[in-house]
Image (spheres, rainbow, N blue to C red):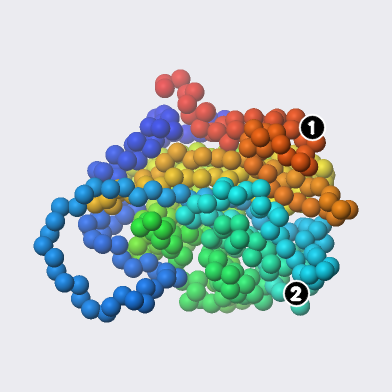
Amino acid sequence: MKRPLPLGTFIRISACMLLFIILLSGCWSGDDPNRSSEPNPPPAVEQPVDENTPDQPEPSLPEQPVEPYTREATLVAVGDIMMHSPQLPSAYSVTDTTYSFDTYFEPLEGYLDGDWVIANLETPMAGEEAGYSGYPQFNAPEQLADALKQAGFDIVSTANNHSLDRWEAGVRRTIDFLEERGLYHTGTARSEAEAAIPLIVEKQGISIAFLAYTYGTNGIPIPAGKDYLVNLIDEARIKQDIKQARDSGAELVTVSLHFGHEYHRQPSEEQKQLSQSLIRAGADIILGSHPHVVQPYEWISTENDEGDIRIGIVIYSLGNFISNQGPDQGTAKYTDVGVIFSLPITKQFPEEIVTLGEPETVSTWVHKYYENGKRKYRILPMEAVLANQNDTILQPYHYTMLEKYAAEMNSHLQSLTEEADTLPNK
Ligand SMILES: [Zn+2]
């Protein structure tokens, strides 16, 4: 089915160039035009404070022309971090009497090196005393957060249908454990006041807001009067939050949406419409999750009520990054496949123009195997494994399978983009 293209056909490169032109002409609709010539306001939350900065007015210097320069940064996003019950004994060491999940991410060295690296944490961490468990009401050991930090993640979205699996206490403990390890979190909160502050993380002089919402909580009701615990998808509310994030100094707004239909490889009309509407309202990057399979990405160009054009990018589902799912477990094909979605971002000075570049994708596969009689898991970057052909655990049939997966995933990820490229009026 062809998607509507409100502004005619955009190939991917021209979308980027157009974005650049729009920014130059100052009609970036989500931005306050009065703000563009001012220094960035202080970010809203959790920024490190330089304690050596003296509390004195700076001496005024004669104005000098600023040499133009560009800052480059990368946002890296992956999908669901899951903890099914077979993963628990797999990660437990009898000698150390604790859990370690580090080996999941070891083959990914160099792939999670972005300035902002974000995943969807699809399990509470409610503490050992609550009893660790897999599906249907997850409770992962908090050592998972250590592994995420060690692997290079900075931020996790915690708004998903499992947020309330361990009720309010689970929401609170999860955030405590994340903060103890220096991980940013978005989508759930311990108080009204915490929920009211958008997460804005500045790297390389670029401030990005990270918002997160879920379609629901698996029928577990949010306690009365405590709506702040989990952000639910509510279009009007998300639009307000986008505006608030921009007013708080965000130059880009990323919205993580836990939505869509499980095991569907293409987005639903609802996913498309909501994404379009949020980009129109000021979102720049939409990171989808929940279907447990990867859905494609596409650039969306929209025109708002003022006639300004906004362009953003959406990946409808990032798939499973780590889980016990897969055809070998009786779940749908491609549930053992994920993607590392990397988005280059540049900021040009002194104009302070922020531009999104063309995304790069690395398809991943969860390899389940046995070592000394114990079940193990690791996430493999498909194409590098295929190029090197020197993995000591994989069997020849794995390579044959990965070749098919890698080729299929590359065309699948771009399937909505290619659709635009092949429109007849191109
Ligand atoms: Zn989900």
Callout 2: SS? helix
Residue at 70 percent of width and 72 percent of height: 126
Left or right of 210? Residue 63 is left
Q: Look at 71% across and 60% down and name the residue there.
A: 101
The spot of residue 334 in percent (x, y) is 71, 40
Provide the residue designation for mark 2: 128
Task: Report the number of discs.
Answer: 2
**Left or right, 124 with reference to 78:** right
Reply above or below: 221 against 250.
Answer: below
Q: Residue 309, relative to residue 83: is it above or below?
A: above
- Of labels 2 and 1, earlier in sequence is 2
Mark drawn on residue 396: 1
In which quarter of the view is residue 16 placed?
A: top left
Q: Amino acid at mark 2?
A: Glu
Establish if 104 lies above or below 184: above
Secondary structure of the residue carrying tag 1 is: helix
Residue 403 visible, this orientation: yes
Pick whichever, 187 or 409, lies toward us: 409
Q: Amino acid at mark 1?
A: Pro
Query: For the view shown, which residue lies furthest in the right direction?
Result: 373
**Looking at the image, which residue sits at the far bottom?**
55
Residue 295 screen position, x and y as percent: 61, 41
Q: Measuring 69% from the left and 30% from the top, which residue is drawn there? A: 403
Left or right of residue 150: residue 390: right
307 left or right of 393? Answer: left
Q: Nearer the viewer, mark 2 or mark 1?
A: 1
Q: What is the quadrant of the C terminus in the image?
A: top left
Q: Residue at x 48, y 29 (%)?
A: 420
